[in-house]
């Protein structure tokens, strides 16, 4: 559960005063809180942990670690949830 | 090198290993703190590529592994109540408590659910006002801001049926405890990259001054870890001890100030019991008095629950880097990921699970010779 995964911001909006957006991890998209990364906007890559973006990263670096995670089969496990499906 | 074939920068990896071999003149014991790093090291066989004089030991940085037995028992007690819905990160369900685990409670009809994010627990509470929704909030500094945000939002919305069983742990006090132990062997640390993404690495300056031990904040890819090891060995060989940052693409000295702010708003530092290790002063985060109405421990009256660790599991030594999982008599026999005896066998970030997954075969081969 402690993994943090790079993903790409595909949309953002403000909900109840908090900035949230959809973030894409390969084929999977998840709602993500963007409140901790005001500097990141749509198209940027962020490192996401338990549904919260914690830093903005360079696109090329993000792709690279994403490939590594996918090859390790960890992406599905990390995004496991009973309550949300996408 | 066979483990690195699939990784496209194998050439760079070879280069770093060659450089390491060139620089190292005597044995060094290094520890990676974070379980995510342990997993990468095992998966890619990095420990096996290193010159034999560099020994890697694995640290206590798996939140699933260090959550105390009594906290698991509290979660089980809450999940067994008919009015409660216990919501947790997935790995926690199979961690053995004193008598059972959350998975069995669920199988027997307990309302236990798995989420990826605390935000989902909050949504569930909004949609189900008749349920007492408890979020089982474990994790290091990386996870704590997300958990803090959930409570902060609940308070702001006046959400009455949401509460938190909080068991957050902090990395720097754990390093201090390891270094203060008379049995400590660790001479350099790979710092936890995502914890430092949130907290920055200024906290680590104090450790350097106190113990003169090099710390290199590292990332999670094979090359990140190899580079961090090279930076550590270089410091050690030159007799230096500073904090360096290998994971610059995500970590700054200050860390994420917005995340730190919400942390400080909702949580305060407290003493915390770590599974296998025992109590470490000021090593946890608990809800501030202003958020006491969201404290599941108080709501369900579980404060009094205590528990003793089972004797056979040597996870205490494993989590402190004193022993390897393979030194445990139960490893791979009475303790497997399907039937874990101790917590480090549960999560993929646990050292025992990582060894079971990536080293069992190698060990069986060596033993049959
Ligand atoms: S192999 Fe199992 S019993 Fe042994 S230390 Fe690891 S978790 Fe504990």
Image (cartoon, rainbow, N blue to C red):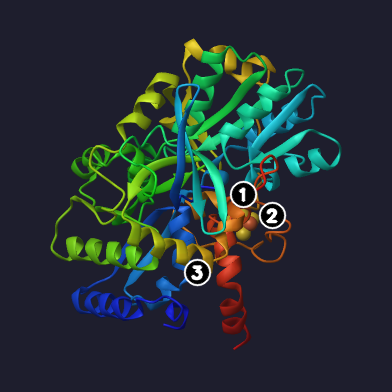
What residue is pinned by disc 1?
B343
Please tell me if label 3 and label 2 are on a single chain.
Answer: yes
Q: Tell me: residue B224, above or below residue B366.
A: above
Q: Tell me: residue B26, above or below residue B180.
A: below
Dot 1: within a 10 Å radius of its alpha carbon, few (fewer than 14), some, or many (20 or more) residues?
many
Label 3 vs label 2, nearer the camera: 3
Q: Residue B17's spot in the image, x, y percent?
A: 29, 77
Q: CA distance from mark 3 to mark 2?
A: 20 Å
Look at the numbered discs 1 and 2 and tell me whether their residues touch, using CB distance below 8 Å: yes
Q: The numbered mark 3 sits on a residue in which chain?
A: B
What residue is pinned by disc 2?
B340
Label 1 vs label 3, nearer the camera: 3
What residue is pinned by disc 3?
B43
Q: CA distance from mark 1 to mark 3?
A: 20 Å
Secondary element under disc 3, as helix, strand or loop, is helix
Q: Residue B110's spot in the image, x, y percent?
A: 81, 34
Dot 2: within a 10 Å radius of its alpha carbon, few (fewer than 14), some, or many (20 or more) residues?
many
Q: Is mark 1 within 8 Å of ligand 1?
A: yes
> What residue is at 63 percent from the left and 53 percent from the top?
B346
Toward the viewer: B323 or B9? Answer: B9
Ligand 1 rendered quadrant:
bottom right
> What residue is at 73 percent from the left and 18 percent from the top?
B129
Q: Residue B88's spot in the image, x, y percent?
A: 64, 37
Toward the viewer: B132 or B234? Answer: B132
């Amino acid at each position: 559960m402690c993994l943090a995964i790079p993903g790409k911001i595909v949309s953002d909006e403000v909900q109840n005063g908090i900035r949230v957006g959809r973030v894409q991890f390969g084929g999977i998209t998840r709602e993500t809180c963007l409140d901790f990364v005001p500097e990141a906007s749509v198209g940027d890559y962020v490192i996401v942990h338990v549904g919260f973006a914690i830093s903005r990263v360079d696109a090329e670096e993000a792709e690279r670690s994403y490939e590594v995670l996918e090859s390790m089969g960890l992406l599905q496990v990390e995004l496991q949830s009973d309550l949300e499906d996408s | 090198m066979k483990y690195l074939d699939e990784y496209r920068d194998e050439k760079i990896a070879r280069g770093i290993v060659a450089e390491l071999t060139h620089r190292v003149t005597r044995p060094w014991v290094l520890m990676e703190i974070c379980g995510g790093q342990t997993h990468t090291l095992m998966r890619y066989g990095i420990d096996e590529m290193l010159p034999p004089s560099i020994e890697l030991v694995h640290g206590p940085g798996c939140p699933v592994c260090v959550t105390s037995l009594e906290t698991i028992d509290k979660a089980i007690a809450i999940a067994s109540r008919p009015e409660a819905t216990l919501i947790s990160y997935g790995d926690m369900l199979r961690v053995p408590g004193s008598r059972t685990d959350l998975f069995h409670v669920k199988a027997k009809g307990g309302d236990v659910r798995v989420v990826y994010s605390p935000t989902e627990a909050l949504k569930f509470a909004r949609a189900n006002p008749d349920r007492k929704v408890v979020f089982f909030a474990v994790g290091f500094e990386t996870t704590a801001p997300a958990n803090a945000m959930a409570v902060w939002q609940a308070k702001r919305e006046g959400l009455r049926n949401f509460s938190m069983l909080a068991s957050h742990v902090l990395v720097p006090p754990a390093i201090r405890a390891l270094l203060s132990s008379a049995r400590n062997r660790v001479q350099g640390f790979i710092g936890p990259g995502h914890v430092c993404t949130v907290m920055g690495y200024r906290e680590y300056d104090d450790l350097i001054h106190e113990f003169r031990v090099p710390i290199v904040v590292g990332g999670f890819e094979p090359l990140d870890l190899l580079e961090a090891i090279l930076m550590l060995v270089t410091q050690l060989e030159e007799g230096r001890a500073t904090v360096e940052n290998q994971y610059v693409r995500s970590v700054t000295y200050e860390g994420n100030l917005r995340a730190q702010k919400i942390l400080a708003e909702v949580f305060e530092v407290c003493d915390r019991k770590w599974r296998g290790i025992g109590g470490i002063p000021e090593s946890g985060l608990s809800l501030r008095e202003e958020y006491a109405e969201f404290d599941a421990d108080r709501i369900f009256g579980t404060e009094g629950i205590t528990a003793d660790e089972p004797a056979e599991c040597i996870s205490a030594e494993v989590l402190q880097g004193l022993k390897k999982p393979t030194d445990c008599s139960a490893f791979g026999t009475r303790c497997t990921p399907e039937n874990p005896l101790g917590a480090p066998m549960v999560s993929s970030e646990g050292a025992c699970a990582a060894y079971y997954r990536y080293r069992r075969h190698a060990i069986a081969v060596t033993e049959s010779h």
